[in-house]
Image: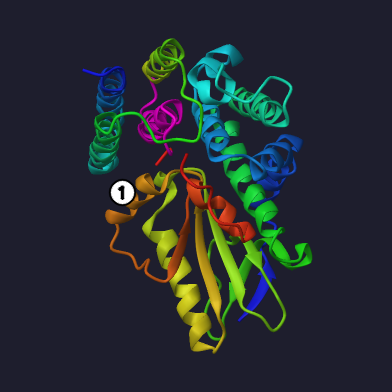
Amino acid sequence: MRFQDAAKDARAVVYAGIQADPLVARAAQLLADATAAQRVLARAAMNGESSEPDAWRTMFPTLFGTAAAAPGSPERERSEAILAASLAVAGRGEQVRSQLRGAIVESLTEQLLARRVPASSIRRERRILFDGMSAEIHPYDVTVETPGGPAEAYDCKWGARGISADVLHQLDDARTRAAAEGERLLTVLVIFDARRSCEVRLARHTAPRAGTRLVALESLDRLAGRRAEPAP
Amino acid sequence: MSQAADLVEQVVAALGRLTELGETIEAEWTYVHDLEMVWTARLRAVAGAGPADSAMPAVPPAELEAAIGRLVDEAGRVTDPHRAIDWLSTLPQATLVALGEAAW
């Protein structure tokens, strides 16, 4: 098993431009430190129609209301910053917002992983090659490549609807081929959506999933080696 | 009916409208209805369980009513069926956050 940069085709060049947008890094940085409720705010506002911040402040009273953290506190400032970044994403137009959201989940995954493993071991847009096998079509969004250690491959999606049979097969095939070569490859789906919705989506598929981990919105902090935030 | 139950039923009605829109994506018909079913059950279970045993301060009733009303209004603005499918998952999570519950 070995890793290789994905081909720099037209899609890769365009997408690299999206990934390099400063708004992606900004949003991912904020979300890496966010609470579960703040992540739901980001999901809603980036998915929403309204562009007025006050509308969203009304919708999320636990973040902006009288029972929320005091104005000026770090917690409240983060909620405001997440709202501003999310509305900036939503304001980019339908196609670009969709690309930005995907890139944000990838960048968020990278940032959380960097709290658990050396940043130098984290790579983006990589293919995994196996002896005697043709290369997979789609590169992995994020990989952890540790010499002599187990490798990790992450496929990141904005919503549960992004879970497809192709994705499940690719992850499972990679894991089983690695095992056949005596290597360990941890395959993970990172979905910026509630596990409940992911399970609904997964229930429709017969593709293998038992060997693939699912990290959903409520358990993102596990990427960093932290326990998920307890329910309020 | 408690305030939470009344508000949750407004959200359930909004989920029904999102389902009508989302089911126009023929390939997603089953997924859309399954989403509506599981989230409706979750929301009604929360409403039926009474106030959350939460460490968070309770949201004043007027703020909660305004929050749910605005969330329902936001869902009503959705006209694109693909976005409706996203909102079938997003609206319940935002509702649960407003209610001071875990969003799942």
Q: Kindly identify the residue that appears in the image at 43 percent across and 11 percent down.
A: B66
**Residue situated in front as seen by the camera: B24 or B14:** B14
Q: Kindly identify the residue that appears in the image at 53 percent across and 47 percent down.
A: A229
Q: Position of residue A231 (x, y in %)?
A: 46, 43
In the figure, is residue A132 to the left or right of A108? left
In the figure, is residue A204 to the left or right of A29? left
User: How many numbered marks, from 0 up?
Assistant: 1
Residue that sits furthest to the right in the current view: A120
| A138 relative to B90, above or below | below
Q: Residue B34: within the magenta?
A: no
Question: Callout 1: few (<14), some (14-19), or many (20+) C-alpha neighbours within 10 Å?
Answer: many
The magenta segment? B78-102
Q: Position of residue A72 (x, y in %)?
A: 74, 22
Q: Residue B97: within the magenta?
A: yes
| A210 relative to A28, above or below | below
Snapshot quadrant of residue A93: top right
Q: Secondary structure at mark 1?
A: helix
Q: Quadrant of the N terminus of chain A?
A: bottom right
| B76 relative to A226, above or below | above
Residue of label 1:
A200
**Residue situated in front as seen by the camera: A224 or A134:** A224
Colour setup of the view = rainbow
Q: Kindly identify the residue that appears in the image at 28 percent across and 29 percent down.
A: B47
Q: Kindly identify the residue that appears in the image at 53 percent across and 52 percent down.
A: A228
**Residue situated in front as seen by the camera: A69 or A146:** A69
Which amino acid does the dot numbered 1 rest on? Val
In the figure, is residue A43 to the left or right of A79? left
Q: Position of residue A33 (x, y in %)?
A: 67, 43
Snapshot quadrant of residue A202: bottom left
Q: Principal SS element in the magenta part? A: helix
Label 1 lies in what chain? Answer: A
